[in-house]
Image (cartoon, rainbow, N blue to C red):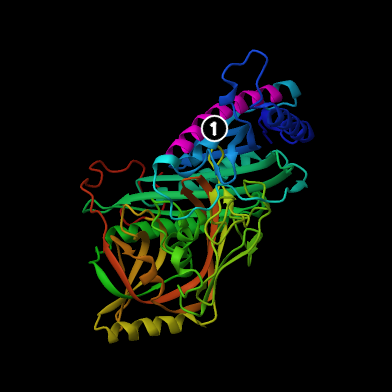
Amino acid sequence: MRLHAAAKGAAAGSSVLLDTMTGELQRAFTSLGKPGPNQKDADKQLPPYFLSYSVADATSVTIRAQYGALADSTSNHVRVADVQVRIGDPKLDNTHGNHRASAVNSLQLPLGDDHVALARTLWLATNAGYGTALENYLRVKTEAQVRAKEEDTSPDFSKESPETSVSQPAPAVVVDRTAWEQRVKALSRVFRDYPDVYQNLAMLTVQNETDYYASSEGSRVVDPHRQARVVVFAVTRADDGMDLFRAQTFEAENVDGLPSQAEMEAAVRELGKSLEALRKAPVTEPFDGPAILSGRASAVFFHEVLGHRLEGQRQRGDEEGQTFTKELNKEVLPPFLSVADDPTMTTFGNTWLSGTYTYDDEGEKARRVELIQNGVLKTFLMSRLPIASFAASNGHGRAQTGRMPTGRQGNLIVTSTKTEPEADLRKQLIEEAKKQGKPYGLYFEDISSGFAVTTRSAPQAFQVIPLVVYRVYVDGRPDELVRGVSIVGTPLAAMKRIVATSDKSEVFNGECGAESGTVPVSAVAPAMLVSEIETQRQQQGTQRPPILSIPGAPSTGSTKEAQ
């Protein structure tokens, strides 16, 4: 086995790191804002009312292959500290309004257990963060005097009880690099049998991270977590210039939990077949009618269309559209549907959930939150940024290193009390299409992602990009694969058109980007039948397929790799 030398000491010295964080934090918190012996204009120096240190200590291994050959194979060990400084008081501080991101200052920490080196780095980051916080607090005070009264006058920071949980740090990543390099190359090599797949990438990423958190309120948290992921990505282009892609991911807590090589290669081969079929599929026309979303597609749909709009910070601020702010205790979904977010779940069935965590990035304990019960909206995903009617965190303050935590999804779980076998959903789809005078309904097998507009400056709409779509004809013709469609609409209307769901749920694991950065997420949902869904044409593309034939492609009619 090959292990990067820097990773070997990753788990050592956790007590040195945490003790240094706690000691330097206390020294800074009790000293900042107090005038020194030679200090002038001391009246401009204000003490912080809150100070926290967050350190992400991660070891990782990344192996990438393309076209069946190794592209790179690296190991890494990095420590990054986020220092959060708040000046003023919880009612109004330097994070107010669009200054929220200014509270965090980041700096890379030494990897070893040198107390002085760690302390001096934290000291440097704290001084820089304090200066930025002070400048922004003065701006906030000025803006408060000249701007109109805000609609939501909630404080800028919630009061929470300190948390103490010191677990053993995650071990350094240990991977048989030689064996996994061969496995990743083999996954990428599958595409040599598919000459119309022009680009491909297979990648293994294994990361063991320990998050350390200390605050002036007295919190001390050491929280380890691990993740292993294989991602396979492939691209082709149709004769009319439309670019098409598919992706397949396999995730587990560690490499031992990933599927067998045979299972992954079979899935990649199906992906290659799918792309070649999509190249030949007709481009569908805009559609407004009934559809079924598979469980995986439904999970992505709920994440994008509903989940983001239930994040707490979306409910305050002049720039936010606040789609669901006034819908509290009202029916926003059909009564047979409920939605929760539960980062404490580690698996669903036999599938590992990547949105799992024990403590959020503000040192708050993760907890299950019942967002919608029997169709009725009950609460939002809360960080320590209060909103009207909700003054406390519910353990969903999440952020990428270097960003300010906000309310984010973890494991979004959709459940239904009106379930039917998928075969019955298909019959209902055909009946609904007939009733509406449509020649077909649509079946969305896979959806990649999308975007949700949540600001007031644009219409409150969404768009999600399906990857595999079929027309289901009412006259009994075989289903027809089509391409070039995206789902569009407005969230309140789309959600209330769900008619029924299947009796089997599926998992979507992925990463989600928002203002607090990219975080791992999961969504679990059953397939759903909607009475009406609107689609539009995707951008066509103008570039033609490659003129020069791909080297090493199999001969016409052959399924074997050319020798």
Q: Work out whether 205 lies above or below 110.
A: below
User: Which region shows up in magenta?
Assistant: 118-143
Q: Is residue 135 magenta?
A: yes
Q: Is residue 475 visible?
A: no
Q: Residue at x 24, y 83 (%)?
A: 437
| Front residue of 210 and 493 | 493
| Front residue of 205 and 477 | 205
Residue underneath mark 1: 133
Q: Residue at x 57, y 29 (%)?
A: 129
Q: Residue at x 46, y 54 (%)?
A: 316
At label 1, which amino acid type do we have?
Ala
Residue 521, given in percent of the width and then of the height, sits at 54, 55
Q: Is residue 532 left or right of residue 75?
A: left
Total of numbered circles in the picture? 1
Q: Is residue 114 magenta?
A: no
| Front residue of 133 and 444 | 133
Q: Residue furthest top?
A: 38
Residue 285, given in percent of the width and then of the height, sits at 22, 67
Which quadrant would the N terminus be assigned to in this image? Answer: top right
Residue 438, given in percent of the width and then of the height, sits at 25, 80
Residue 409, given in percent of the width and then of the height, sits at 54, 56
